[in-house]
């Protein structure tokens, strides 16, 4: 099948899926209101085969050191699949299945499958990485850009979306934006930080008087990025930034790496 844009609908919810642009969700509209930022940094893209930054773009697999392109110098960031065209494997009115075969500059072969399922009050994203050859470390996650304000409003208090969550810890962030390896008590925002939620990711965004949206995931890590005016990012992932080096999860022929997240919304 082609990689043409896909429109999913359920009730008054509508999602645009862009297989040809990194398997990205280009937009999510609820009752005609766009929840995801548009423009240069937009929608929600899958982070695979790693999330966040890799220090100096290098990671080790046993004794072998691999160098990734420094797309956020001096680091490599957010994987390779967001810059690639994905294939559309299957589409129904409210669900799309996309695949992407890992290739250069990633040094291993494998297949990524992403399922985007829309309901009247929720969007569920599921992703897996499989290999039939050599095992390799990997991470997966999602990077949504939620609009800070809806319809260009400035919110009842001028601040737009409010973020509520209760992490067990915050990864101490070094000057290089990478975790130092120390876990500290969660600090007040604004953030570009990784948090640990051992019972699963559970973050609530509230646009006062408009909408509440809960981001949940069985994964235990979430990066929250709200250091900018236009958007708020809540990024569930299978490990912390630089995790290919500090907390590698192996994809093996017997054991794929899998993750899922759900965004559930309620009008206020």
Image (cartoon, helix red, strand yellow):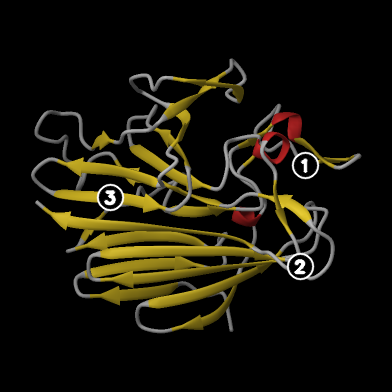
Q: Secondary structure at mark 2?
A: loop
Residue 253 - label: 2
Q: CA distance from mark 1 to mark 2?
A: 23 Å
* Residue closest to the far top: 175
For disc 3, the neighbor class at 10 Å (few under 14, some 14 to 19, many from 20) is: many
Q: Residue at x 44, y 67 (%)?
A: 17
Residue 91 left/right relative to 210:
right
Residue 90 location (% of width, % of height) = 51, 83
From the viewer's side, name the closer residue of 183 and 177.
183
Q: Say which residue label 3 marks.
A: 214
| Cα distance between the residues tagged 3 and 2 | 34 Å
Q: Residue at x 40, y 42 (%)?
A: 234
Q: Residue at 49% x, 70% y: name it.
A: 115
State which tag comes first along the sequence, 1 or 3: 1
Left or right: where 55 falls relative to 37: right
Q: Nearer the viewer, mark 1 or mark 3?
A: 3
Asked which quadrant contains residue 66, the reply is top right
Q: Is residue 69 left or right of residue 80?
A: right
The residue identified by callout 1 is 68
Say if 155 sits above or below 84 in the image. above
Residue 246 image offset from top left, x and y in percent: 69, 34
Q: Are marks 1 and 3 in contact (CB under 8 Å)?
A: no
Q: Nearer the viewer, residue 157 or 170?
A: 170
Residue 182: percent from the left, percent from the top? 57, 20
109 sits to left or right of 152: right
The secondary element bearing badge 3 is classed as strand
**3 or 2: tag closer to the N-terminus:** 3
């Amino acid at each position: 099948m082609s990689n043409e844009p896909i429109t999913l609908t359920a009730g008054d919810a509508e999602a645009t899926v862009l297989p040809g642009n990194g398997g990205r969700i280009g937009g999510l509209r609820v009752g005609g209101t766009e929840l995801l930022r548009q423009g240069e940094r937009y929608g929600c893209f899958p982070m695979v085969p790693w999330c966040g930054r890799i220090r100096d773009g290098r990671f080790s697999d046993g004794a072998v050191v691999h160098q990734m392109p420094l797309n956020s110098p001096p680091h490599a960031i957010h994987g390779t699949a967001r810059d690639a065209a994905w294939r559309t494997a299957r589409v129904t009115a409210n669900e799309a299945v996309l695949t992407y075969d890992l290739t250069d500059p990633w040094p291993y072969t494998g297949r990524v499958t992403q399922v985007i399922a829309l309901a009247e009050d929720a969007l569920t994203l599921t992703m897996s990485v499989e290999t039939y050859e050599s095992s390799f470390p990997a991470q997966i996650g999602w990077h949504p850009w939620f609009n800070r304000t809806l319809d260009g409003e400035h919110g009842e208090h001028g601040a737009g979306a409010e973020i509520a969550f209760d992490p067990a810890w915050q990864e101490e962030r070094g000057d290089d934006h990478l975790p130092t390896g120390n876990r500290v008590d969660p600090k007040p925002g604004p953030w570009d930080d990784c948090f640990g939620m051992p019972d699963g990711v559970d973050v609530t965004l509230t646009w006062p008087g408009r909408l509440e949206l809960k981001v949940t995931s069985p994964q235990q890590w979430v990066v929250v990025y709200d250091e900018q005016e236009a958007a708020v990012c809540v990024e569930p992932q299978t490990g912390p930034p630089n995790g290919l080096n500090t907390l590698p999860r192996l994809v093996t022929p017997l054991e794929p790496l899998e993750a899922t997240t759900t965004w559930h919304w309620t009008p206020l």
